[in-house]
Image (tube, rainbow, N blue to C red):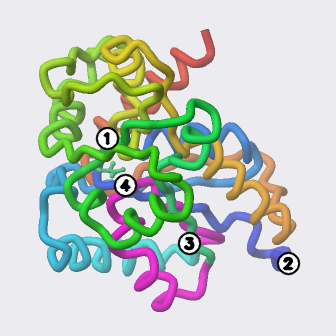
């Protein structure tokens, strides 16, 4: 349970870049009485094309800063970091750490089969293979997209009509799993390119956070604050404001 003097402690949300803003938005909407801080590393995107060793070094540096804010919980809003680092992070820190994973279970259950688009690091990780074995029922085709996250990071101000069809693999799937939070910004273009529904782990992860905070009885801040603490803060704030205004229409 939260101590009374702890109610202002933030939930920290972290991604390599802008992708996690989708998840920050969903978490902030589901948990209106919680303070949030957003941490990004926009100048090192894409993590998904870096070595595992380099990603772990970058992530540990950022988590040491996150830990200094004494967070209620941390949301890793990055499929790549979840795949490569979540076990290490949970062993190292004693606050709750949630991750996001490709929504394979939901896509296969709903559509029968799926094409998973994700970063090279995610697709080649043991945890991704375990996820496919557990929930894919042999109906998953996974394709690594080496340049998609950085293209979206660089062209985000075309949202919601980011033109990415030239970067997509040829396929005729029944559904597409957006296995990188950056891709959620291009969901409309991806859905149009394959003429099918897309799935992602955004709402499921935000709902998981809500349940954890409810168990901790931490819903009490009167006027909550959302701060941008690391990375290209001006860009991240601007895109978050754009999400707020688009989704409030
Ligand atoms: N947004 C990250 C993810 O969900 C990946 C972007 C990157 O490669 O840095 O996997």
Please identify the quadrant where the C terminus is shown: top right
Q: Secondary structure at mark 3?
A: strand
Residue 1 horizontal/vertical position (percent): 85, 78
Residue 68, above or below 47? below
Q: Mark 3, mark 2: which one is toward the viewer? A: 3
Q: Mark 1, mark 2: which one is toward the viewer? A: 1
Q: CA distance from mark 3 to mark 2?
A: 17 Å
**Which of the pair 75/1 is nearer the observer?**
75
Q: Secondary structure at mark 1?
A: strand
Residue 157 horizontal/vertical position (percent): 27, 20
Are the residues flagged by discs 3 and 4 in contact, CB closer than 8 Å?
no
Q: Residue at x 50, y 56 (%)?
A: 100
Q: Which mark is residue 97?
A: 3
Q: Is mark 4 within 8 Å of ligand 1?
A: yes
The residue range painted magenta reads 71-95
Residue 18, above or below 198? below
Q: CA distance from mark 1 to mark 4?
A: 17 Å
Q: CA distance from mark 3 to mark 4?
A: 13 Å
Residue 229 horizontal/vertical position (percent): 39, 56
């Amino acid at each position: 349970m939260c101590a009374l003097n702890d109610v202002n402690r933030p939930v920290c949300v972290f991604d390599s870049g802008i992708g996690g803003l989708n998840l920050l938005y969903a978490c902030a909407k589901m948990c209106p009485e919680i303070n949030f801080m957003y941490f990004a590393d926009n100048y090192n995107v894409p993590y998904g094309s870096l070595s595992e060793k380099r990603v772990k070094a970058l992530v540990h540096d950022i988590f040491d800063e996150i830990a200094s804010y004494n967070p209620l919980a941390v949301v890793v809003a990055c499929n790549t970091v979840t795949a490569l680092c979540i076990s290490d992070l949970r062993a190292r820190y004693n606050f709750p750490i949630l991750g996001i994973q490709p929504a394979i279970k939901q896509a296969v259950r709903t559509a029968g089969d799926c094409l998973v688009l994700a970063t090279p690091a995610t697709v080649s990780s043991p945890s991704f293979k375990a996820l496919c074995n557990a929930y894919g029922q042999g109906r998953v085709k996974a394709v690594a997209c080496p340049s998609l996250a950085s293209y979206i990071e660089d062209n985000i101000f075309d949202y919601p009509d980011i033109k990415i069809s030239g970067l997509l693999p040829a396929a005729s799937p029944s559904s597409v799993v957006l296995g990188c939070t950056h891709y959620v910004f291009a969901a409309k273009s991806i859905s149009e390119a394959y003429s099918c529904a897309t799935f992602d782990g955004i709402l499921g992860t935000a709902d998981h956070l809500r349940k954890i905070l409810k168990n901790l009885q931490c819903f009490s801040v009167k006027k909550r604050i959302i701060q941008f603490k690391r990375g290209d803060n001006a860009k991240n704030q601007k895109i978050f404001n754009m999400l707020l205004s688009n989704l409030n229409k």
